[in-house]
Amino acid sequence: MKLIIVRHGDPDYVKDSLTQKGFKEAELLADRLCRLNVDAFYCSPLGRAKDTASFTLNRLNRDAEILPWLQEFQGMVRKGLIVKSCWDRLPSEWTVNPDYYNRDKWNTTKLMQSKNVTEEYKKVCDGIDELLKKHGYEHCGSYYKVMNSNHDTVVLFCHFGVECVILSHIFSCSPMVLWHNFIALPTSVTTLITEEREKGIAVFRCQQFADISHLYAGGEEPSFAGRYCECYNDKERH
């Protein structure tokens, strides 16, 4: 099967929708996705994801199933009196601790144990396992048991943080590296494909990560959303 994970367009977080640029990006994304033979669409319940999906769904006269666990990742941590997202940490906070690079230990640190990270991570892992099982692939350790071998194409409209959680579970790695060393820009497309080299056993391989060729093809510059300043003295987001 083919699993396609799409990040929403350039966001207007105040309105939980898209900016004008984001709507243009979603149109160009639809040009790309409408060429595919998609078996099922799934979407986050948040407005910016639904608005992104609407361009593709309206053209195809299709619907997407809304899945609550596809909303932006809700794992939070407490540092003193401040509660913040677990997946937006400064390098000095996490790179010095090797546990953050370990798939079994990243969420056992004092910081990650301060709020709800483990519970929220499990919700997403259980959600993607249930979805993949529905499409014929059952999670089994670090691989997938093939219950119904198929060529289904499944598209998820969601968010960068939760995308990294999904990938970390499928690939059995810590999400910290994905959250902090990778970036999926708005309307980027990540494509995973199954390989069944042994009968009854499948693994997912990443064929594309955060591809935005549809934006370049449409003459649209990629959004900065999700990135931070390239150099410390730059005026962009710190």
Image: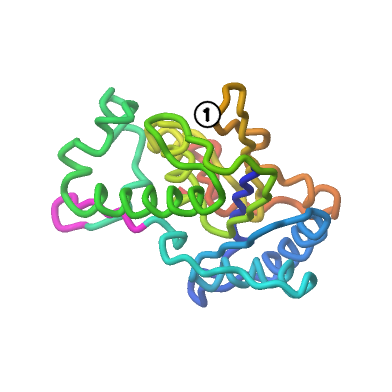
* Residue that carries the numbered disc 1 in the rendered image: 201
Question: Which percent across, then down, holds residue 146?
Answer: 53, 37
Q: Nearer the viewer, residue 136 or 103?
A: 136
Q: Is residue 77 left or right of residue 73?
A: left
Magenta range: 74-82
Neighbour tally class for label 1: few under 14, some 14-19, many 20 plus, Cα within 10 Å: some
Residue drawn 63% across and 55% down? 155
Q: Does residue 132 show up magenta in the picture?
A: no
Quarter of the image for the N terminus: give it: top right
Amino acid, disc 1: Ile
Residue under the image location 65 percent in, 67 percent down:
53
Residue 71 picture quarter: bottom left
Magenta residue check for 79: yes
| Secondary structure under the numbered disc 1 in the rendered image | strand
Residue 189, how many percent across, how many down? 66, 47
Residue 118 higher or lower than 175, as above or below: below
Residue 195 appears in which quarter of the rendering? top right
Residue found 78% across the figure and 70% down from its top: 60
The relative height of residue 114 versus residue 41 in the rendered view (above or below) is: above
